[in-house]
Amino acid sequence: MNILILGSGGREHALAWAVKQNPKTDRLIVAPGNAGIAQLAECADIDILSGQAVVTFCEENAIDFVIVGPEAPLAAGVADATRAAGLLTFGPSAAAAKLEASKAFTKEICDACAAPTAAYARFTEAAPARAYVTAQGAPIVIKADGLAAGKGVIVAMTLDEALAAIDDMFGGEFGAAGAEVVIEEFMQGEEASFFILTDGTHALPIGTAQDHKRVGDGDTGPNTGGMGAYSPAPVLTDAIAQRAMDEIVLPTIREMARRGTPYQGVLYAGLMIEQGRARLVEYNARFGDPECQVLMMRLGAQALDLLLACAEGRLDQARVNWADDHALTVVMATKGYPGRYSKGSAIRGLDALPETSSQMVFHAGTTARDGQITATGGRVLNVTARGATLAEAQARAYAIVDAIDWPEGFCRRDIGWRAL
Ligand code: AMP
Ligand code: GLY
């Protein structure tokens, strides 16, 4: 079949890598793609936020299956447009993707289905929000309702920080995303990510992961989009995962279907685990980045069969063939990230690296010019490896990191520490 993947990051490189290994794949196109993706698929420069542009491209290229990677096209209704055009599509409708696009909506769903999550209140004006946090005290969590590229959440450890966050959000710091603010109880515990495929009715867990959000070793320094990840997440034991399915995920899926907006795609549940029980932190309507890279490394070619079963509404017949393995990815970023950084530095040594079913350098922000790979983003490479143990996966990943010649880049040296 002819497959189109939308997106341009390490997540989409990993999806393309797994899909490409499946013999069902004839032609693979990624839009817009990047320099690493171009080594295994065709790249196409189309406006992936335009449903019409995507549908036209699919018709011109006889696409059989569309996989939507990032949240922005989902929130823009691209999966609605491709489905309306009769194209088999992996990814939720805009109405279902509200589970990521609106934090207040997610809270409403949790209330409706009694899913455990932090206590909260919603505000559209600063004065009552300020009064509320003053009464509640710190620590407390202030969230812009809408999509804010991962920056709309302030975990305020003091009352002053909380009040400043409220003023920033209502002052327009996050644009329309901050027109409504959700204020939440601060939850203690250890975070983990749980990935579930659902076709709207059936659900199939496809793995757990943990990421490292802080830029510095020992989980210090500013927050980032994620500096590394590993799967499985030992904190999310089978028993806790099963309980999270029963108390959070399945009730959410039923509630979305009951409202006439069934969720179809991957549901990424961010969980806070404390004393053997998970509470929901947030939902995302897509694979995590870089969590997808470790999930794809573990699933390999069967990932396509699972995504197809999801899109075709037959997840009840699908199962995951697990190897007893571990995967770990190290993000290499341009020095200065997540603050200011320069673009265009040359990365050498990638050609000499073996690419196998247990090690791969996924590209997140690169372009190729005259045969030279250059860095064009903050997060640039995702050095990913698999092993029989997490320690083995980690050692493999860092051996590859050390073979990459990129003086302008850096990475954390302790990815996986919590689980080792
Ligand atoms: P979110 O974008 O909702 O995932 O929030 C980003 C990060 O903020 C999460 O990964 C958590 O580390 C933290 N966070 C969000 N909500 C809470 C909460 N209610 N209690 C504690 N930490 C939270
Ligand atoms: N790595 C976190 C995310 O994709 O949202």
Image: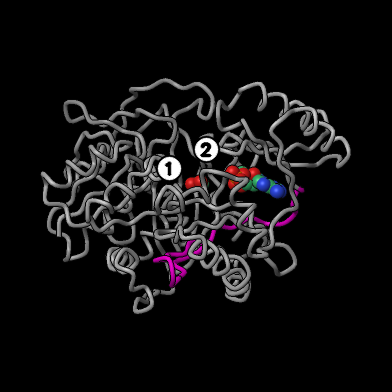
Figure colour scheme = one colour
Q: Determine whether, in the image, residue 18 is placed left or right of residue 200.
A: left
Is the magenta region chiefly helix, strand or loop? strand
Which of the marked residues, 1 or 2, is nearer the chain's N terminus? 1
Q: Residue at x 40, y 28 (%)?
A: 407
Q: Determine whether, in the image, residue 190 is placed left or right of residue 33.
A: right
Count numbered badges in the picture.
2
Horizontal and vertical percent for residue 329? 44, 51
Give the structural element (helix, strand or loop) at label 2: loop
- Quadrant, the C terminus: bottom right
Q: Which residue is mark 2?
A: 147
Q: Determine whether, in the image, residue 71 is placed left or right of residue 259.
A: left
- Quadrant, the N terminus: bottom left
What residue span does the magenta drawing correspond to?
Answer: 185-208
Identify whether 157 is placed above or below 327.
above
Give the structural element (helix, strand or loop) at label 1: helix
